[in-house]
Image (tube, coloured by chain):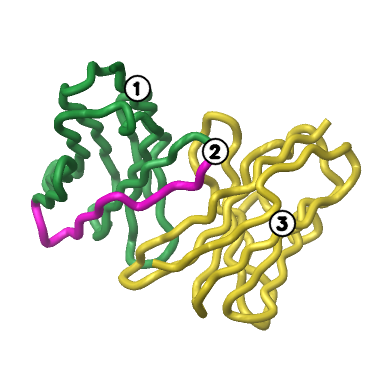
Chain colours: A green, B yellow
Amino acid sequence: GENVEQHPSTLSVQEGDSAVIKCTYSDSASNYFPWYKQELGKGPQLIIDIRSNVGEKKDQRIAVTLNKTAKHFSLHITETQPEDSAVYFCATYLGSYIPTFGRGTSLIVHP
Amino acid sequence: SAVISQKPSRDICQRGTSLTIQCQVDSQVTMMFWYRQQPGQSLTLIATANQGSEATYESGFVIDKFPISRPNLTFSTLTVSNMSPEDSSIYLCSVGGDDEKLFFGSGTQLSVL
């Protein structure tokens, strides 16, 4: 089955810096790659996603890039703010509603 | 996206008892799922809640321990039966939207003493 590795497990940045989280996957048939943000005491929230026919997608301060050849995709957050502090999960799909999740990255943004 | 209401938001239970978690969606959805998130861990799919038929359980999860009901397209329940401290987790309801997008409820924080 699909294997997803997410790094780093913890990321600490200063407010205003950029943050990058990377996920690698094993199954080249994966075709949908969402990112979720989970704040303390809340359920995961879909923040951005990308499909296999696109290399990059941007939404204000967040962007996702996909390298299908190397089988990795990354979440980029620019101009980080304290409210960006949360756990971020990547996921991959093989054409169904059942994703494989990464283990999560705890992002801490220091004011 | 659908609005998902999950309750209770948290509970503290004694071992050997059972807890039923409710998930209500503001619109009809075909795909509905239950996840478990152990402390500091990722999301693990327990089962797919099928409307009008038995749920489809993932490896490691059984109906006797986690019975699920799905009487209609807007509501589902998950029961955690005969609880032990190892069942202490966050339990999450999720629904499938358009184009494989998944949306999650706010979760139920369960602590078993």
Mark 3 neighbour density, 10 Å: few (under 14) some (14–19) many (20 or more):
many
Q: Label 2's element?
A: loop
Badge 1 and badge 3 in a common chain: no
Report x, y in % for residue B105: 53, 55
User: A42 or B38: nearer the eye?
Assistant: A42
> In the figure, is residue B81 to the left or right of B48?
right
| Badges 2 and 3, same chain | no
Q: Mark 1 points at which residue?
A: A108
Residue under the point 52% across and 73% down: B26
Q: Residue A84: where, in percent of width, then height?
A: 31, 33
Name the amino acid type tagged 3. Ile
The chain ID associated with circle 2 is: A
Q: Give the range drawn in magenta.
A: A42-55
Residue A46: in magenta span: yes
**Dividing the picture into quarters, in which one does residue A26 lie?**
top left
Q: Nearer the viewer, mark 2 or mark 3?
A: 2
The one of A82 and B20 positioned closer to us in this rendering: A82
Residue A111 against residue B40 in the figure, above or below:
above
Could you tell me how far apart the alpha carbons at marks 1 and 2 are, in whole angstroms? 16 Å
User: Which of the 4 image quarters holds residue B68?
Assistant: bottom right
Q: Rate crowding at label 2 as few (under 14), some (14 to 19) or many (20 or more) other CA atoms within 10 Å.
A: few
Q: What element carries label 1?
A: strand
Name the residue that disc number 2 marks. A41
Task: Check disc 3 and report its element: helix, strand or loop.
Answer: strand
Identify the residue under disc 3. B21
- The number of numbered discs placed on residues in the rendered structure image is 3
The crowding category of the residue bearing disc 1, from other C-alpha atoms within 10 Å (few below 14, some 14 to 19, many at least 20), is: many
Residue lying farthest to the right in this orientation: B16
Q: Please, is residue A38 above or below residue B71 in the view?
A: above
As measured in the structure, the alpha-carbon distance from the residue carrying label 1 to the one carrying label 3 is 31 Å
Chain of the residue on which disc 1 is drawn: A
Residue type of the residue flagged with mark 1? Ile
